[in-house]
Amino acid sequence: VTLNWQALTTDSNQTITGYQYQQAEGTASFGSSWTDISDSDANTNTFVKTGLTNGTTYRFRIRAKNGKPGSAVSAKPLFASLTGLTATAGDTEVSLSWDDPNDSTISGYKLSLEGGTYSSISGSDATTTSHTVTGLTNGTTYSFAVRAENGKPPSSAVSAKPLFARLANLTATAGDTEVSLSWDNPNDSTISGYELSLDGDTYSSISGSDASTTSHTVTGLTNGTTY
């Protein structure tokens, strides 16, 4: 917690030689003892108190040495935001990864999809730095944010668009002025059809193809020419 105040020049007609502080947790009493702010002098107007517990509310008072205390102020130290969140698109999924905050108090992580409510990432703990979101729709852009279970502020949102998997095992069998193509069925019911590129040209739709299509014959070719 960083404390700031307006520095004094005199207090009860005495020269200011430094400042002291009191600290209490929650609504507990300050007590009677004061702690010197190390290296403070008449010009000091700020003090950083370290070693506090994130998520706990503390109260502070500041005074010139041997002077009257100022009003009490409260503050709650916060966890730093998660950093380095990245999203890598896959087939109906997006893989997320983030920097390790090195905070052993983290009990797990939560995920927000499309700005919605945060839900726990099953099996996550303080060492978790990645998670794969499945069951997404290819071609749709999604936004993601991640935060820790213990209240650590969320990461910045990132976006990714799941992509159809690359077709596998495409083979070509030559015939008389034609080539028969076949490929593995990707088992993706969202596919509405297929497109063909010949010699690197623009893709054009394969007439009559649908999600179940796994072959196509290209006709009208020239024998002896490699395509």
Image (cartoon, rainbow, N blue to C red):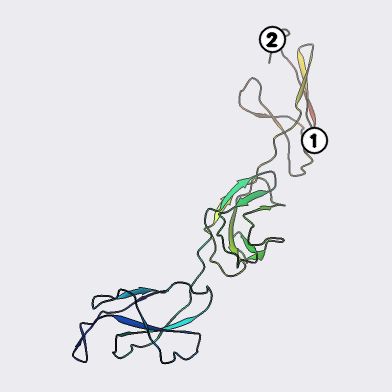
Q: CB under 8 Å between callouts 2 and 1?
A: no
Question: Which quadrant would the C terminus be assigned to in this image?
Answer: top right
Q: Of residues 224 and 90, which is closer to you in this image?
A: 90
Q: State whether residue 87 is above or below residue 65.
A: above
Q: Residue at x 73, y 8 (%)?
A: 223
Q: Badge 2, how many Cα within 10 Å: few under 14, some, many 20+?
A: few
Circle 1: element type:
loop
Q: Which labelled disc corresponds to residue 62? A: none
Circle 2: element type:
loop
Image spot of residue 90 (x, y percent): 66, 44
Q: Of residues 53 and 217, which is closer to you in this image?
A: 53
The Cα atoms of the two marked residues, 2 and 1, are separated by 29 Å
Image spot of residue 11 (x, y percent): 23, 88
Q: State whether residue 43 is above or below residue 145.
A: below
Q: Residue at x 80, y 31 (%)?
A: 214
Q: Of residues 69 and 200, which is closer to you in this image?
A: 69
Q: State whether residue 124 is above or below residue 45.
A: above
Q: Quadrant of residue 3?
A: bottom left
Q: Is residue 27 left or right of residue 206?
A: left
Q: Is residue 72 left or right of residue 156?
A: left
Q: Residue at x 26, y 77 (%)?
A: 41
Name, please, the residue furthest toward the left. 13
| Residue type at the position of mark 1 | Asn
Q: Is residue 56 left or right of residue 94?
A: left
| Residue type at the position of mark 2 | Thr
Q: Which labelled disc corresponds to residue 225? A: 2
Identify residue for label 1: 185
Q: Badge 1, how many Cα within 10 Å: few under 14, some, many 20+?
A: some
